[in-house]
Image (cartoon, rainbow, N blue to C red):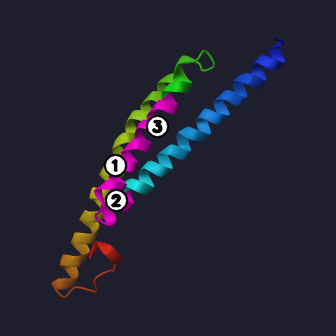
């Protein structure tokens, strides 16, 4: 295989797995949030399936010889960190929602409407 073919194979491989990494992360966040917002645990579990798929696609990029050690460490860090981001952000959103709801009930303003969260 010529060097240009090897580079094309490497770029194609990393583009596909990089796309899947981001795509699965978005699906994880979307399904996790939908499950929590609509109180449907099965949607949250689908989100967890996409979290595993996102982590696996990241590890698929890491366990190749295509990336330098810095990029491998960065992908591992991002893959692990993103497993915790949707639950943490959900707690932050609920905290904001509860804060503004309490403030509105105390007569300091109007309550924001968050649809099914109310």
> Which residue, given by chain and number where applicable, does mark 2 sit on?
35
Q: Which residue is mark 3?
A: 53
Q: Secondary structure at mark 2?
A: helix
The residue wearing badge 1 is 45
Our reading of the magenta stretch's main secondary structure is helix
For the residue carrying disc 3, how many other residues have a C-alpha within 10 Å: few (<14), some (14-19), or many (20+)?
Answer: some
Q: Position of residue 52 (x, y in %)?
A: 41, 37
Q: Residue 17's spot in the image, x, y percent?
A: 60, 33
Q: Which residues are magenta?
A: 33-58
Q: Residue at x 28, y 67 (%)?
A: 96
> What residue is drawn where x is 67% and y is 28%?
13
Q: Examine the rendering and report whether any part of residue 114 can be seen.
A: no
Where residue 24 sits in the image (x, y, percent)?
50, 44
Q: Residue furthest left?
A: 106
* Dot 2 alpha-carbon crowd within 10 angstroms: few under 14, some 14 to 19, many 20 or more: some
User: In this rendering, is residue 118 above or below 63?
Assistant: below
Is 90 or 39 nearer to us in this picture?
39
Indicate which disc, 3 or 2, sits on the residue closer to the N terminus. 2
- Marks 3 and 2, Cα distance to the nearest angstrom? 18 Å
Residue at the image position 30 percent from the left and 51 percent from the top: 88
């Amino acid at each position: 295989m010529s060097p240009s073919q090897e580079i094309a194979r490497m770029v194609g491989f990393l583009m596909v797995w990089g796309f899947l990494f981001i795509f699965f992360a978005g699906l994880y966040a979307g399904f996790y949030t939908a499950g929590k917002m609509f109180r449907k645990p099965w949607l949250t579990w689908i989100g967890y399936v996409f979290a595993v798929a996102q982590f696996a696609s990241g590890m698929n990029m890491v366990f190749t010889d295509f990336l330098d050690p810095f990029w491998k460490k960065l992908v591992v860090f991002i893959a692990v960190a993103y497993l915790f981001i949707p639950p943490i952000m959900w707690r932050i959103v609920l905290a904001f929602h509860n804060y503004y709801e309490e403030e509105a009930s105390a007569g300091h303003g109007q309550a924001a409407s968050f649809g099914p969260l109310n």
